[in-house]
Image (spheres, helix red, strand yellow):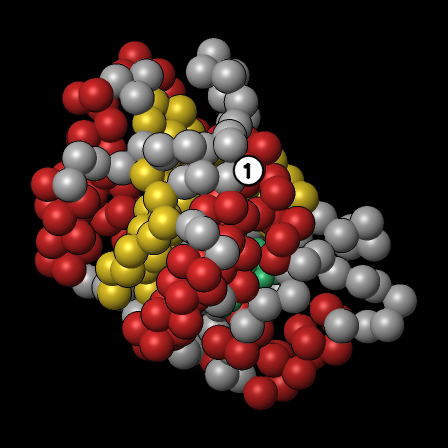
Amino acid sequence: MKLKDKKVWITGASSGIGEATAKLLASEGAHVVLSARRQEKLEALAETITASGGSCEIAVVDVSDRAGMEAVGRQLAEKGGIDILINNAGTMPISPILSGRVDEWDRMIDVNIKGVLYAINAVYPGMAERKDGHIVNISSVAARLTYQSAGVYGGTKHAVRAISDTLRKEAIRFGVRVTDIQPGSVDTELPDSIAHEKIRSAVKDNMYAEESPILKPEDIANGIMYAISQPAYVDVSELLIRPVIQE
Ligand code: NDP
């Protein structure tokens, strides 16, 4: 088993990419710490993983809650720390900038940027001290390109990519590896976070057009698995994974 005895913390594990990654990593022998806000979803996932012989625990937390994230970090450190962080929680309430949905901008910045930083801060000092660890941040193809109506979301994902590469350079001397995964369109609940009705239906029409099969969450989980199962001298710094049809 590739990940036997590794402890992996997955944020945003209650659906989509996080859920698929939790199942895959647990099936490869990792002990997975499942995080999100929806406790009942995490409990159902934990049952599935346990029933298949996997090992897991739950940490219900909002990634934008700084004190809550610090508390989870302390609890995980007391239990021996985390080997791999999958920094995956995210939200995408996109809209044109002119629509001035400032609360949604704040939410994206809080979850997609601050949440990522809070999770890093919760585990990185322990990894640096042990001189071992891997931090996998999930940004997006929107970390490389820009899309109309996705200015703030794209801004948060560009920030995650920049933070990832900076952290990678800083963490080298502490034996900690950093990977930035950039998914293209994946079939998950993410578009449901778009409150702007016209944009939500345009995004869904575009994503689910018949001639364009999009990725499954498992396709990204496989990319994550590839990145974290390389020998210690290999750093998969970035991985852009798109459906064939996506420009
Ligand atoms: P989902 O909506 O299925 O999953 C998002 C996850 O994030 C859920 O588990 C949700 O759990 C969690 N989450 C959201 N807000 C918070 C919060 N404040 N605190 C803690 N957890 C939170 O979407 P995906 O699986 O697609 O998204 C995973 C990541 O992949 C995101 O970062 C997204 O930006 C990125 N991505 C997705 C793409 C796609 O096409 N689907 C493309 C490119 C990148 P809960 O609601 O229970 O808290």
Amino acid type at circle 1 is Met
Relative to 31, is 69 on the left or the right?
A: left
Q: Is residue 7 visible?
A: yes
Q: At which x and y percent is residue 146?
A: 61, 53
Q: Extreme bottom residue here?
A: 197
Mark 1 highlights which residue?
Answer: 225
Task: Determine the image quadrant of residue 217.
Answer: bottom right
Name the residue rendered at 51%, 30% in the picture: 2
Q: At which x and y percent is residue 19?
A: 49, 60
User: Residue 177 or 245: which is nearer the viewer?
Assistant: 177
Relative to 33, is 151 on the left or the right?
A: right
Q: Extreme right residue here?
A: 211
Task: Determine the image quadrant of residue 83.
Answer: top left
Relative to 219, is 10 on the left or the right?
A: left
Q: At which x and y percent is residue 15?
A: 48, 66
User: Residue 161 or 146: which is nearer the viewer?
Assistant: 161
Label 1 packing within 10 angstroms: few (<14), some (14-19), many (20+):
some
Name the residue rendered at 43%, 50% in the picture: 54
Q: Is residue 20 above or below residue 199?
A: above
Relative to 88, is 111 on the left or the right?
A: left
Q: At which x and y percent is residue 191?
A: 57, 73
Q: Is residue 98 above or below residue 23?
A: below
Is label 1 in a helix, a strand or a loop? helix
Name the residue rendered at 74%, 61% in the picture: 214
